[in-house]
Image: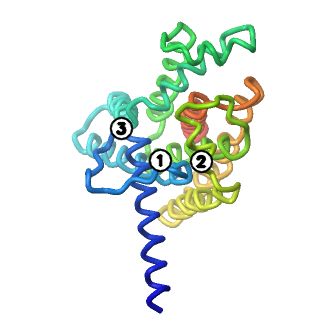
Amino acid sequence: MVEFVKTKVARLGTLGSGLAAAIAFYTCLPVPLSWTLEFRGIARYAPFVGVAIGGMLGLLDILLQVLAMPGLTRSTLVIVAWIGITGGLHLDGAIDTGDGLAVQEPHRRLEVMADSVTGAFGVMAAVALIALKVAALSDLSANRAVVLMAAAGWGRWGQLVAIARYPYLKVSGKGAIHQDSLGSPWDLLPGFLFLVALSGVQLLLDGNSWILAAGMVTGGSAVAILTGAWFNHKLGGHTGDTYGAVVEWTEALLLCLLAGL
């Protein structure tokens, strides 16, 4: 019995260390120095971190609404806060990916993506992403908090799919730690079930929102999978930059889809 309890405590400690490391890696939120961080395998926690980020953005959105902030301004502030919470980590990857895919010679794309200089196509990709998010969120008048949680969660689940499904194209880099430490495709399941449960909670809170709830599950999973597949088709695999691009484009496209619904 004592050994059983020790084993359970050890597993909880490992879980807590991994989740803390995921918060430190994927966000700019302060993490106490006393926390133990275990970065190996943090990708599996990404969808949960995404939902937490969406929840914080939802609270900010509610606060701004209470302060009678106009809809477009409120949406813009939420999107800016979104970039701030993540430190622009994924947006930076989307920018580099945009520059790389603009190159006509496929063999030079990774070289261009690794260049620290931002090109015109990367800037255009960033502008398009931010514009899509602001416009889509502005068109939503209800359920904005849960939509933000779904978009951020499914975006990071899409990243997890890309890590599990496709080869990593670099010998080293920020994304290498994810590729090396992901256990198996079964690591996709907890995040998926959690996001499905999010839709179920939304349906319980508002029985008339079944179209939205269904759209979050079917649209979220489809956009997440197809986005990663598209980048793999263009590059023959993934890098840390394309992982970020998967997150950003899944978030933006899912917001547009849910605004349409």
Query: Distance from label 3 to label 2 (Cα)?
Result: 18 Å
Residue appearing at x 66%, y 47% in the figure: 221
Q: Amino acid at mark 2?
A: Trp
Residue appearing at x 67%, y 15% in the figure: 109
Q: Residue furthest left?
A: 67
- Left/right placement of residue 69 relative to residue 83 reads left
**Secondary element type, mark 3:** helix
In the figure, residue 104 lies in which quadrant? top right
- Left/right placement of residue 229 relative to residue 195 reads right
User: Label 1, on which residue?
Assistant: 50
**Secondary element type, mark 2:** helix
User: Label 2, on which residue?
Assistant: 157
Earlier-in-chain disc, 1 versus 3: 1
In the figure, residue 110 lies in which quadrant? top right
In the figure, residue 225 lies in which quadrant? top right
Query: Distance from label 2 to label 1 (Cα)?
Result: 9 Å
Image quarter (top left, top right, bottom left or bottom right) of the C terminus: top right
Q: Amino acid at mark 3?
A: Ile
Query: Distance from label 1 to label 3 (Cα)?
Result: 11 Å
